[in-house]
Amino acid sequence: MREQEQFLHVLDRDEAERRFRAAINSTPTQVERVPVEAALGRVLAVDVQSSVDVPSFDRANVDGFAVVADSTYGASEEQPRVVRLGDETIHTAVVPRTAIRSGEAVAIATGGMMPRGADAVVMVENAELQGGELRISRAVTPGSGVSFAGTDITTGETVLRRGQLLTSRDTGVLAAIGIAAVDVWRKPVVAILSTGDEIIAPGQPMQPARVYDSNAQILADAVRELGGEPLRLGIVGDDVAALRERLQHAIASADIVLLSGGTSKGAGDVSYVTHLIPGLDGLGATGGGAHARGEYADLDTLPRQIKRAAVLIYRLTR
């Protein structure tokens, strides 16, 4: 029977967390370009400026008639103002041919491009067509019923900032200014390695003295929820050589390694850090440190209970 090592130096939670955070380099490492349709939940690596006005043209906000506002002054239901209605009807995606002058009007749909000369839209509810004339029963002022070019976003305006977590509203803004792809920070790859002779994968028949691996699932989904990319490396038994080999592979493949296991320091349990660090160059004695492109997070005291695993991963990533 191997002589058991004694854990006589106990850290309080705050000091353990401080050492953990000190060992982890949280600086973003690489930028990647992703299509906007895949950008939800990603973190912007650069400021985003608009190269266009939104809207890009003066457009009608209501269905009605494009006019010169002074043609409607004094209009009322008792004494409507009468203007001549042009032949053109302006739908969306149509560039108007008509130029409007005082005393004239042209029918226009919501979203339609305002014709030259017009500065307001009379709502269809406030006008009545009689022959070739339009009788307007309510006056409008310049700008009524119109969204002018650039009123939402102007060319050169910074619409999103570096470091911003992209929501559905943000991706909508990107689409509105015509951006099809955006630069974001690469998701950190988090390797998850479960240890212990007693651990079996869900889906296998339960056996005496065994437990299902619940930690790997909750840690992987927690990593996804927090914006990372989990790399599940399966289960390795309580074998020092096998565990060291799998851990070296994990460190070479990921930015962070979560080692789930170590219910105690009793017989057979080899996942606690003193068995592993001597064979891994570059790992610090506090259970964390840079190694190549990866970080090693020794969570050797992580219990196998789901609740405690969840609490730990969320506390360490906040």
Image (tube, rainbow, N blue to C red):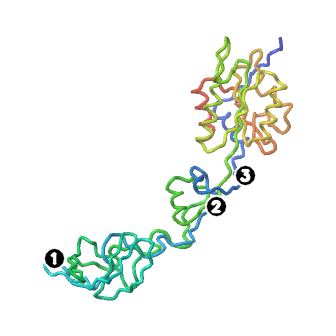
Does 109 sit above or below residue 222? below
Ranked by sequence position, the earlier of labels 3 and 2 is 3
Q: Looking at the rendering, in which quadrant would you find the C terminus? A: top right
Q: Report the residue marked by disc 2.
A: 46
Ranked by sequence position, the earlier of labels 1 and 3 is 3
Measure the alpha-carbon separation of dots 1 and 2: 56 Å
- Is 90 situated left or right of 46 in this image? left
Label 3 is placed on what type of residue? Thr
214 and 262: which one is in front? Answer: 214
Q: Are marks 1 and 3 in contact (CB under 8 Å)?
A: no
Q: Position of residue 178 (x, y in %)?
A: 56, 66
Label 1 is placed on what type of residue? Glu
Label 2 is placed on what type of residue? Val
Q: Residue at x 72, y 42 (%)?
A: 24
Q: Report the residue marked by disc 3.
A: 29
Q: Position of residue 237 (x, y in %)?
A: 76, 22
Q: Secondary structure at mark 1?
A: loop
Q: Report the residue marked by disc 1.
A: 77
